[in-house]
Structures are given as C-alpha cells and as structure tokens.
Image (tube, grey):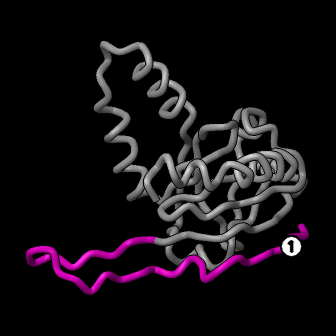
Amino acid sequence: MGYKESVVGYCGKLWENTQKLGKTNFKTLMFIGEYHYTIDTKKRLSLPNKFRKEIGAKVIITKGLENCLVVYPIKEWEVKSEKVGNLPDSQTEARGYSRIILSGAMEIEIDKLGRILIPDYLKKYADLKKNIVICGLFNKLEIWDQEKWEEYKSKTEEEVEELASRLGI
C-alpha cells in the first residue's frame, strides 16, 4: 500500500490548555492539515501518523455532509451522538439527520499499522475510489475522494471571503 503524505501546518498534537476552569484542567484534540493516501486492495486506509496516538485504538466513522465520511475519536463521538440523540423527534429534519448520521455510524478498530477498514456502504456513500484525502478538522477527521475534495475545495476557496464575512470571522 502506497501513500503520499502532504503536511499543511502543525498537526495532530494533543494540545493542553493550561487555563483552569474551576478546578478542572482540560485537554483538546486538534487535528489540522490535508493528507493524501490511497485505499489498498483490502479497503484499508492509513490514518495520518501524527494523529494515531491521540485518536486511540478505535474510532467511529459515519456519513458526513457533502458526501464525505467523518471519523470521530470515541470521546468526541460521545459528545456528537448525544447532541444528535437529543434532537426533537417531532421535527422531520431532526429525524432525518439523526437517521442518516446514527444509522451510518460504525465503530472501527485501528490496526497496528494505523489503518482502518472502511465498510462498503460508507465507501459507496462517499464514492471513494483509490486516491483519498484526509482533512483534519479540529476534533474530527473527514475522508474524501480526492477528485471530489479538489472540486469542493476549489469552489469553497472562491467563496471564503464571503463566508468569513457572513460568519463574522
């Protein structure tokens, strides 16, 4: 299995916040950067080496927005799934979102070489071919087919100033 890693910025370190909130110190995962890999013939994908220590032995992988996949460390998934699980059942949008995100989720073990096996239904959902991009997004990772990522990134980069303005950033 071959891969090409392209590193953008300082990535995958467990950042410790030294400020105290009450009596509690807290730690935050920070995944950033863009990494290029390939899926091997057994549908395994290597996770970036810089993330492996912090991400743990198991992850949750599920359907994401814009037809990518999202990889959550277990503790981050607990936070996300609680938010999704608490959406009101009386709202059609909430039921639909919950069904897709929660039913699409699967717990995956990371092997000794830092690889995950992507289930067929998720590979199909994200239309993953051989060349893959893994994006670090603070507390989670996204997995994209490289071609789809390049299209999405190109379009979004053209709109980034307008997006920043609308978001007040």
Image quarter where the N terminus lies is bottom right
Q: Which portion, as a residue range, is magenta? A: 1-29
- State the residue at coordinates (79%, 75%): 6
Q: Where residue 34 appears, x then y in whole percent?
A: 71, 67
Q: Is residue 91 left or right of residue 2?
A: left
Q: Is residue 47 left or right of residue 58?
A: right
- Is residue 93 in the magenta section? no
The residue closer to the viewer here, 66 or 51, is: 66
SS at badge 1: loop
- State the residue at coordinates (27%, 86%): 18
- Is residue 15 in the magenta section? yes
Q: Mark 1: few, some, or many residues within 10 Å (few <14, many ≥20)?
A: few
Question: Which residue corresponds to mark 1?
Answer: 4
- State the residue at coordinates (73%, 78%): 7
The residue sitting at the bottom extreme is: 18
Q: Is residue 163 left or right of residue 124?
A: left
Q: Where residue 13 appears, x then y in whole percent?
A: 51, 81
- State the residue at coordinates (53%, 48%): 107
The residue closer to the viewer here, 120 or 111, is: 120
